[in-house]
Amino acid sequence: VQLVESGGGLVQAGGSLRLSCAASGRTFSRYAMGWFRQAPGKEREFVAAISWSGGSTWYADSVRGRFIISRDNAENTVFLQMNSLKPEDTAVYYCAASRPDEAIVAVTTTGGPASWGQGTQVTVSS
């Protein structure tokens, strides 16, 4: 599956952004999806994940309560609503997909996903 992120940009601390990830193909609903991020000089880290049905979601402790992951299987799109943004949320955000029919855990570590998007920059100013 091919993934294309959009929606990044520059926002002030306390603001919100909504990232989108559009997936190619006709079997999007078979994939668990995740969001990761990588700040300058740091390793890529898990942010959020959602099961193929949308019925299960996981979050990193650093974003729980501020970020919401969702998906629209009819539109082959996964979203990341980011609220109460902090300067430490500044990073390149990547969308990732599991292999078909894998469980959500497959997109909760950087070694798990089978596909990655090209990334979208999010910058939060203080």
Image (cartoon, grey):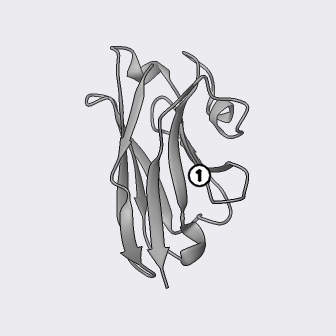
The residue lying furthest to the left in this view is 75
From the viewer's perspective, tell me whether residue 78 is left or right of residue 64.
left
Circle 1 Cα neighbour tier, 10 Å, few/some/many (<14 / 14–19 / ≥20): many
Residue under label 1: 37
- For label 1, the SS is strand
- In the rendered view of the protein, which quadrant contains the N terminus? top left
User: Image point 68% across, 34% down: which residue?
Assistant: 105
Count of numbered marks: 1
User: Image point 59% across, 64% down: which residue?
Assistant: 64
Say which of 126 and 49 sits in front.
Answer: 126
Looking at the picture, how far across and down is residue 27, in whole percent?
39, 15
User: Image point 32% across, 29% down: which residue?
Assistant: 76
> Within the image, what quadrant is residue 54 found in?
top left
Looking at the picture, how far across and down is residue 7, in whole percent?
33, 53
> Within the image, what quadrant is residue 73 found in?
top left
Looking at the picture, how far across and down is residue 98, in whole percent?
58, 25
From the viewer's perspective, tell me whether residue 107 is left or right of residue 116.
right
